[in-house]
Amino acid sequence: MVRSDRQAAGGARAPAAPSRPRARHGVAVPKRARVPGAALPAGGHGLRVPQRAGRARPGPVPRSQPEFYLVQEITRADIPLPEGEASPPAPPLKQVLEMQEQLQKLEVELREVTKNKEKLRKNLLELIEYTHMLRVTRTFVRRNVEFEPTYEEFPSLESESLLDYTCMQRLGAKLGFVSGLIQRGKVEAFEKMLWRVCKGYTILSYAELHESLEDPETGEVIKWYVFLISFWGEQIGQKVKKICDCYRCHVYPYPNTAEECKEIQEGLNVRIQDLYTVLYKTEDYLRQVLCKAAESVYSHAIQVRKMKAIYHTLNMCSFDVTNKCLIAEVWCPEADLQELCRALEEGSRESSATVPSFMNTIPTKETPPTLIRTNKFTEGFQNIVDAYGVGSYREVNPALFTIITFPFLFAVMFGDFGHGFVMFLFALLLVLNEDHPRLTQCQEIMRMFFNGRYILLLMGLFSVYTGLIYNDCFSKSVNLFGSGWNVSAMYRASHAAEERGKMALWNDSIVRHSRVLQLDPSVPGVFRGPYPFGIDPIWNLATNRLTFLNSFKMKMSVILGIIHMTFGVILGIFNHLHFRKKFNIYLVSVPELLFMLCIFGYLIFMIVYKWLAYSATTSREAPSILIDFINMFLFPASEASGLYPGQAYIQRVLLAVTALSVPVLFLGKPLFLLWLHHGCGCFGANRNGYTLVRKDSEEEVSLLGNQDIEEGSTQVEDGCREVTCEEFDFGEILMTQAIHSIEYCLSCISNTASYLRLWALSLAHAQLSDVLWAMLMRVGLRVDTTFGVLLLFLLIAAFVVLTILILLVMEGLSAFLHAIRLHW
């Protein structure tokens, strides 16, 4: 059982245990409960919920096909789906059956009406095709009459139509006709097939329809050709009909006489008009039914989902045949136990159960899952941490510190006052309109921006801050407090005669003939002090601006990276303290800190010391930090002048400490656990005040097998675990620690170099912004006034578009991914 005075929170997700545990620092051991839910491994926190005697195993999930069919039909009809703000409760079983019956009846009615509507529509399209076919084939008959040749064998045919059936009877010929429509892409192949199969005993006439018609079968609007085939003989007629079926032609009967054609045309017009009327009334009735169904489809959909979730949960429960109840073992946060009991009581009361549901708490030795409570602000940062991996139960959660460090490292790479302010305004707009329904139902890309709106807000805000530090606003500097450099102090006239020979000063000739002038800060009055906030704006005009900013940003990246990595090691110390593994602090964390600080911490010391110890007048005497840092490992024979007195001795001491920390890091923990293993014959004792909250490991076996070394206890508790001595594997522990140590030592070097991406991406962002300004805005501002206004307007529009696409979206995404990599 868990003590009631401990802080409750952590570790639960009912009914099923999460597959990925999450980290939470300082939470109590959760209990395991038996409730209607998932079947979990034995042990833990439990609750038993008996059901009424007449209830059997949960039935199948209610059918939801009618609901989805309704939503599909309502969407096809372009009827808006109303969304209620309140969430309807899950309906009881009787109401579910009634709702299912109503939905099924409505589905049957809709399917029948829709089927009739499709039949009417198909019939209408066929009649329209038949009308167009009759209209076009009449032109074929007239054309044949006009261009008909005169034959001496049949002089009586000069005044009669060749395609008149009565005339053909007089000739004794058996003439037949096949007419219809064919798709435009099949006409050429259709004609060749007729010629080859019928051996020329057919006459094919065709013409293209000017308007596109909808296909009655597929509903696709395509171009059609009308054809009329004349043939002699029944066998050829059968071949023609089979060819038409093969090419999916729409064949319609051809009238024998002109009078019959006219009668058919009139009948078709009447039928088409009637079908339009019936189809309109059918669609109107169908829309009325769908509008009525759309009023309740939102609440029905939520109720169906809730019922499916309930049945899904109940199906995971184990069924006790003897007691006729459902039993589930779940993890529950200790802080939510009272709320869980109230929910069980309320459920039993509302369901009128004869036997109320109850909860039993079960002790467990299993590792609980991790529950980290988040809100809409912290959820995005927690997702960034969880994307790499979820920590073990009750470990320090780094997401709290990520709220500050992540947007700050992003801003170091994205530092621009103007770009950061635009990003901040965009995120602020999303935050102020976060309750708008369109934002919650937007497309996938926009939904990603919306879900990370608070991350974007802080990234934009921090980018404004670093942009002010860099004094960079759309690649231009802002002079807010006045520059600390004085140009007039470089002239000879402003100094006494005895000072002019000692300093390289300017005169009128030098100013006129020199392309580049250099300000010397050692000259009195030239450098009057640092800029109050950020980089002095005069560097935006300097030709060596890039050299100065590169040196500044590179050193800043190294300092931030080492601080960030050291902070991560320090967080591990809190984990060891919380789990009462002090030997990990002395044998793992302390050697790691010594290895890090004696090398890279000393590098930070040299950077800061050089900034403070050397001024503009003594800057030429300052040694190179890079050379001194390399000489620290090479032990040069000649002792050159260093940054400070006794530098060589201190560096040797730091290297000795670093060299000693490596074997301690490799062998300290394994040898300590081996010593604990040989300290007693068998293990299984629980130390006083120690609560097992994690799965058994080799080091825990050793700790629990030994008497209380850290607290001086010599008694072994009665309830010790039975663990055999064969469970301790020194080789495995040694190999694991060696892999960890090698990875840490190499990562200290590689990760320190990896943090130089802060400098590289900041340089790339500044240079892209400068190039964009030079290619667009500078050109527009230098054009004469004749066409300058119009050109400037176009260039400003192009500058805005390219700034958003390249500098905000692409560069922002790049800096975002690199910030994630540095945190991982």
Image (cartoon, grey):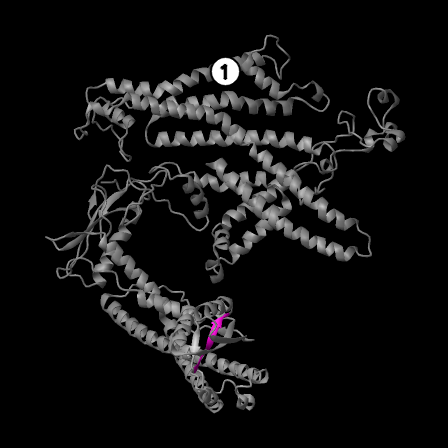
Whether 560 is drawn above or below 96: the answer is above
Q: Quadrant of residue 292?
A: bottom left
Whether 113 is drawn above or below 19: the answer is below
Is residue 460 found left or right of 580 in the rendered image?
Answer: right
The answer to whether residue 287 is magenta is no
Q: Which residues are magenta?
A: 175-183
Q: Quadrant of residue 770?
A: top right
Q: Nearer the viewer, residue 450 or 342?
A: 450
- Residue, x 39% and y 39% (percent of image)? 389
Figure quadrant of the N terminus: top left
Figure quadrant of the C terminus: top left
Q: Position of residue 22 (x, y in %)?
A: 36, 41
- Residue, x 52% and y 13% (percent of image)? 652
Residue positioned most to the front: 153
Whether 613 is drawn above or below 92: the answer is above
Q: Is residue 167 visible?
A: yes
Q: Nearer the viewer, residue 547 or 611?
A: 547
Query: What is the secondary structure assignment of the residue under circle 1?
Result: helix
Mark 1 — residue?
Answer: 655
